[in-house]
Image: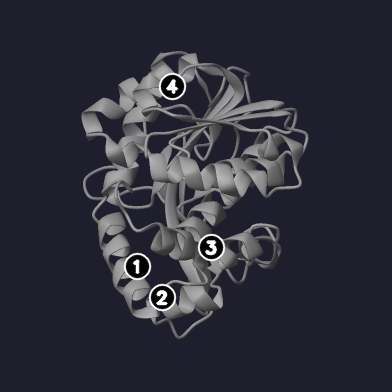
Amino acid sequence: MSLSSLPGDLNPVIANWLQDQDGALLRANADQLTERYRAGQSSARVDLAAYLTTRMPATYAAVRKVLGEVARLHPVFAPTSMLDIGAGPGTASWAALAEWPELLSVTMVEADARFVELAVMLAKSSALKALALATITRAKMSEATGKADLVIAAYVFAELVEKDAGEAALKLWTQTENTLVIIEPGTPRGFARIHAARQTLIKAGAHIVGPCTHAAACPMRGNDWCHFTVRLARSREHMHAKLATVPFEDEPFSWIAVSHTTVPLSGARVIRPPAQDKHSITFKICSELGLVDRVIARRDKAAYKQHRKTAWGDVV
């Protein structure tokens, strides 16, 4: 896994905003924010300094990873407009511009007035015209209007009860001209919302982009859940806020992307870290046939060479 961090032009703006923060208070607020995140709670009323220091880099890394995969799986997709639902400080918008710099129009919708103010400040600092001139509106997800080629809802379904996730996804689908991306924490609760959204969207005629390599019923059962990780570099402030001793962390996330355009599906997705011993490598993979363990024996030299660098999240 490669290291991922915030865009360079964001770092000095955020550093300037954080310069007068009390270190001990920031650590306490960062701990509280982590507990809220792990519990699947929303970001409402969180400390903004703690969010910018710890959650924004992690969210950006996850969204950037997902959008890179969407671009790989859907190479003809070249959005010129995007709608960022539950935008927070605009994290997904910044990630989308990094993937598709040709975006001309960005609209952010956020319910928290503090995050709206922060998103405006950060967007105006960008050299990218689409960000500097972005439309940033205060509204709940259910109140969002307008349509765009790309609609993103990143880490916002946590504000919903699971049974409402499908209905919320369907509303976003009606606002999507081409591709809808939903990203949630890589927790059982986060995946449950993604799973509910996936079921509803397929019934509505949406075409799967990823991570699934099929549109069949999800084979996950019981306490199992589908999630992936991205590794991100920690800034000095991030390390201090978390009293961390290593310069990176792994962010778990679950996601679904669907399109109005048919996207070819093939192969199987590796959904767990490969298990390797001196005799073989075992991959847990998901395909239209369900969940299976694929074992590659070291003695099968060609297959072993082909797959020895295959990682969690790859398609085989």
Q: Which residue is mark 4?
A: 144
Q: Position of residue 106 (x, y in %)?
A: 63, 31
Of label 3 and label 1, which has the lower sequence position?
3
Q: Quadrant of residue 190?
A: top left
Q: Position of residue 152 (x, y in %)?
A: 52, 33
308 in relation to 169, above or below = below
Report the residue marked by disc 1.
30
Residue flagged by tag 3: what amino acid is it? Trp
Task: Return the residue found at the far front.
Answer: 20
Q: On the image, numbered disc 3 is attached to which residue? A: 17
Residue shown at 53%/72% (left/top)?
234
Name the residue: 47% across, 19% down. 173
- Which residue appears at 44% of the width and 80% of the height? 240
Q: Position of residue 103 (x, y in %)?
A: 72, 32
> Which residue type carries mark 2?
Ala
The disc labelled 1 sits on which kind of residue? Ala
Q: How is the image coloured?
A: one colour
